[in-house]
Every structure is written in C-alpha cells, then in structure tokens.
Amino acid sequence: MIEQKQLEASIAKAAADVRANNPLAGSITNTVTIDFVANAQLAVGGSAAMVYLPDEGETLVAAGGAVYLNMGTLFPIYEETIPRTAAAAQAAGKPWVLDPVGIGIGSLRTKLLSELKQHKPAIVRGNASEIIALAGLWGLEGTADDLSRARGVDTADTVEAARAAAIALARYTEGAVVISGESDLVTDGHSVVISHGGSALMGKVTGFGCSQGGVLAVYATQTDPFTAAVAAVNHYNLAGVAAAAAADAPASFKVAFIDELFRATPEAVAGNSIEIQEA
Ligand SMILES: Nc1ncnc2c1ncn2[C@@H]1O[C@H](COP(=O)(O)OP(=O)(O)OP(=O)(O)O)[C@@H](O)[C@H]1O
Ligand SMILES: Cc1ncsc1CCO
Ligand SMILES: [Mg+2]
C-alpha cells in the first residue's frame, strides 16, 4: 500500500510540473462537452487540441505527452480514428486515457471498446456503471458481461459497487482506474484511494466527467498513471468545494469551477482529503 506523505509529495510535484511545463494532451472527445474539456485542461495548466481524423489523432500522439479518447458521440470516421490513435500511443509508449462514455449504446461503440482492450489505456475513467460495464465487456475475472445495465451516460450504480471492476481493470492494464461519484475511487490494482470533496452540483452539469478525463491526460504527461489519477481527482474535488462556496446553481457553478481549477495551488491539490486502503 502506498504511503500517504510520499503520495502527497508526488501529487504536489505533478501539479507544479503541469503549471511549469504547459503540457499538451490531445483529445478525441464528444461534441457535447468539447469546450469544457479544453478549458479545464487549460485552467489546470495544460494545453488542449481536439481532432476527429485518423492521421490527426496520430499527429497529436507524436506532438503531445498523452492523449484522451472519449467515446461520447461517435461518428463513422471514429471506426478508424480511435483504434489508430490508441495503437499509436501504445507504440510510442505514451499514456492514453479512456472514457467509455455511453458504453452499451449501439454496435460501433461496443466494437471499438472491445478492440481497445489490447491497447491498454494508462488510465480508465468512468462513472460506476461505465466501469462495471467495461470490465464485463473485457471479460475480466470476477466480472459479468452485462451491457444492458447501461442506460445512457449517467450512472445507475454506486462507486462502491464498481470497486471490484475497477481493481480488475487496473490489474489488467497495469495502469490506474478512476470511478467518479460522490467520493471518487482511484486504484492501481494494489492500493485504493478514496478522494473526498466536490459538490452535488457537479452531477447537474454535463461534462464534469469528460473534462476530468482531459485533465487526467494532462496530469499523465508529468507522472505515473496512479499519481496522475489521484492528483487530477483531488484537483477536481478541491475546485468543486471552492466553487460551491461561490455559486449555488449549475451554470454559475460551472464558471466558478473553471476559475477554481485555475486558482488551486499544488499544495492544496496535494492536501485534499483522501483515504488510502488496500485493494
Ligand atoms: N454528488 C457528488 N458529490 C461530489 N462530487 C460529485 C458528485 N457527483 C459527481 N461528482 C464529481 O463530478 C465529477 C464527474 O463525475 P460524474 O460521476 O458525474 O461523471 P460522469 O457521469 O462521467 O459525467 P459526464 O458524463 O457528465 O461527463 C467528478 O469529479 C465527481 O467527483
Ligand atoms: C450528454 C452526453 N451525451 C453523449 S456524451 C455526453 C456528455 C456527457 O457524458
Ligand atoms: Mg461520463
């Protein structure tokens, strides 16, 4: 199990390095929340670029330190773009982040998510229902293939219900897995970190999960997947608490949240309330 003081020091360093280096993490992401993803990446100190075409995905892998693949709104071209980009990242040894949004909707999404198993994302991020469904689709031990639980893009399960699926995914990828929810769970298959904070208003605006995925990719350019995952999730929870003190309704909350991502110091990100448990 990882030691808390050591983890906090690594998180503070990662947050400071993101600010200092302005790292690029390119995205292929959905058209609903693409603006929020890019602005969240910039607010934490990173750089953003959003593309749709296969060779452009490969170019962003070469140009950046990590890449974010979000399955939210698929187009036919993605049948080529998504596997080629993931394969390019794997071949280049660069981390890529998978957000299996909407898993269970349609046949292309299922086909692509099945194919992506072989390319081993450094970080998988989803809400509880998405994490359970992905572990089942990938046939991981102790999980059940049941895409029927998917109902859209919002969760129907608790974070704790997805804990075993997240651990199974992390042991398969040898990376990190994030389950977002009231408190977020991060695991590398050995340790589990529960990160507290945030606000219920984050569930009332679309894209808090997608933009968290983009920020995970920014952090993954600077440190190992597990440290990156806890750092990004802490940054989100910290900014969520601060934004809730400034705004009490969804639209103004979203604006305040981007401001608080920008204001958060590396020390405050590292000091966000966490619990460390055995996986
Ligand atoms: N009730 C809550 N209390 C605190 N934080 C929350 C709550 N609900 C969601 N969050 C936070 O909101 C962010 C997004 O999590 P959520 O599970 O809503 O993602 P999602 O369903 O994938 O979102 P989307 O698909 O809209 O992008 C995470 O940082 C999470 O911690
Ligand atoms: C609402 C929605 N529909 C497809 S992607 C998306 C953004 C949140 O996941
Ligand atoms: Mg989501």
Image (cartoon, helix red, strand yellow):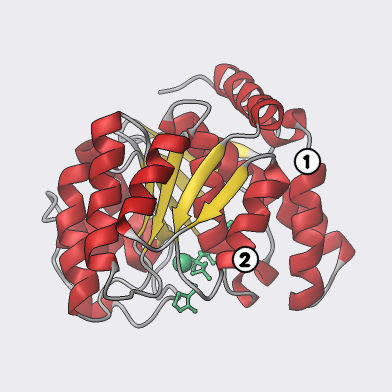
Q: Residue at x 75, y 28 (%)?
A: 267
Residue 264 is marked as: 1
Q: Nearer the viewer, residue 214 or 251?
A: 214
Give the quarter of the image for residue 89: top left
Could you tell me the amino acid type at mark 1?
A: Ala
How far across and down, in percent of the image, does residue 11 sit? 60, 27
Could you tell me the amino acid type at mark 2?
A: Asp
Give the quarter of the image for residue 94: top left
Q: Nearer the viewer, residue 251 or 73?
A: 73
Q: Residue at x 24, y 51 (%)?
A: 84
Give the quarter of the image for residue 1: top left
Q: Secondary structure at mark 1?
A: loop
Marks 1 and 2, the one that precedes in the sequence: 2
Q: Residue furthest right?
A: 246
**Is residue 181 shown to the viewer in this render?**
no
Quadrant in which the C terminus appears: top left
Q: Are marks 1 and 2 in contact (CB under 8 Å)?
A: no
**Image side of residue 213 versus residue 247, left or right:** left
Q: Nearer the viewer, residue 122 or 128?
A: 122
Mark 2 neighbour density, 10 Å: few (under 14) some (14–19) many (20 or more):
some
**Image side of residue 216 versus residue 173, left or right:** right
Q: Secondary structure at mark 2?
A: helix
- Work out how far the residue at label 1 is from the one at label 2, CA to CA, in angstroms: 21 Å
Q: Is residue 196 above or below residue 275?
A: below
Q: Which residue is mark 2?
A: 35
Task: Give the label, 1 or 2, closer to the camera.
Answer: 2
